[in-house]
Image (tube, helix red, strand yellow):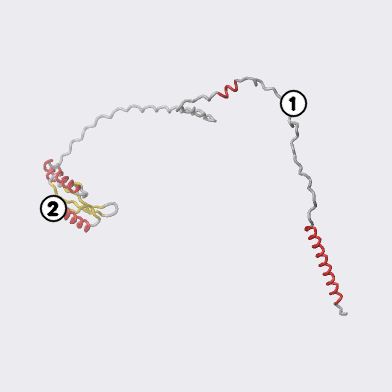
Amino acid sequence: MAPGRPRLIRRAATAAVAVAALTGFAVLLQSVYDRPPTGGEGPAPVVLRPAPEPYKIAPEAPGGMSIPNRDKEIYDVIAAAPPPSRGEGQAPAPERPLYPQPPPAPEPDPPPEPDPPPAREPDPPRAAPAPAEVAPAQRAAPPERAAAEMVWRIQVGALRTRGGADREWKRLLRRHREILSGLALRVVPTRGKRAAVFRLHAGSFPSRAAAAAACAALKRRKVGCFVVKG
């Protein structure tokens, strides 16, 4: 016999025994499930019913604290009465602060006024100085002569450059020739805050009223204008 043959026989026998045991257990389970039920009914279900006698009985002497005036009907009358009306449109009472504020501190008294300084005696009058003689060349001219020498013009623009001032005068003269014709242009250079400004003065006019009338006509045409003297 070969050396490994007994070992194979033992393994085969063990496997055959295990298969036989499993087969027998399966047959037993199948027989139990396939067995028909036995005849007869099972036990009746248990039904719980309440006890016939009451489970709460009022004591003969309840005891406890005695509450007075339980037989009075005034409480029922008060409860049935409607609440008092406050009136339509009536404002509620003002609320009171929970913590009242302390009264304001009294204002201090004003400081006393200082005493007035003592009166000083007036200084004696001084003699008026003699009027200085005015030289003939420094005397003012009569009003009629000053009015005649006064020249009135109108300012119609102010430009940053001399060339711009000349071009603006030509444009104004072309559009408003019926008002500016016959007037001479005088460009007045002035020093502004940042740069030089060239003002356009047109004139001259015999009176301020004539210059104001020309300005009013230009303003009606949306041209800025005002009267200047000199």
Q: Is residue 205 above or below residue 49?
A: below
Q: Nearer the viewer, residue 14 or 20?
A: 20
Type of the residue with mark 2: Ser
Q: For the residue labelled by badge 1, is the local secondary structure a helix, a strand or a loop?
A: loop
Q: Residues within 10 Å of mark 1 (few under 14, many from 20)?
A: few
Q: First in sequence, mark 1 or 2: give its number.
A: 1
Percent position of residue 146, x then y? 13, 43
Q: Name the image quarter holding residue 44.
A: top right
Q: Residue furthest bottom?
A: 1
Residue ID at (21%, 33%)? 128
Percent position of residue 127, x then y? 22, 32
Percent position of residue 171, x then y? 19, 56
Residue ID at (28%, 30%)? 123
> Residue 51 vs residue 190: left or right?
right
- Which residue position holds label 2? 181
Q: Name the image quarter holding residue 122.
A: top left
Q: Nearer the viewer, residue 19 or 89?
A: 19
Q: Mark 1 or 2, which is nearer the eye?
A: 1
Whether pointer 1 and pointer 2 mark residues with C-beta atoms closer than 8 Å, the reply is no
- Which residue position holds label 1? 59
Q: Nearer the viewer, residue 202 or 147?
A: 202
Q: Residues within 10 Å of mark 2 (few under 14, many from 20)?
A: few
Residue ID at (20%, 35%)? 129
Residue 160 tag number: none
Q: Is residue 79 above or below residue 150?
A: above
Q: Residue furthest right?
A: 1
> Residue 96 vs residue 164: left or right?
right
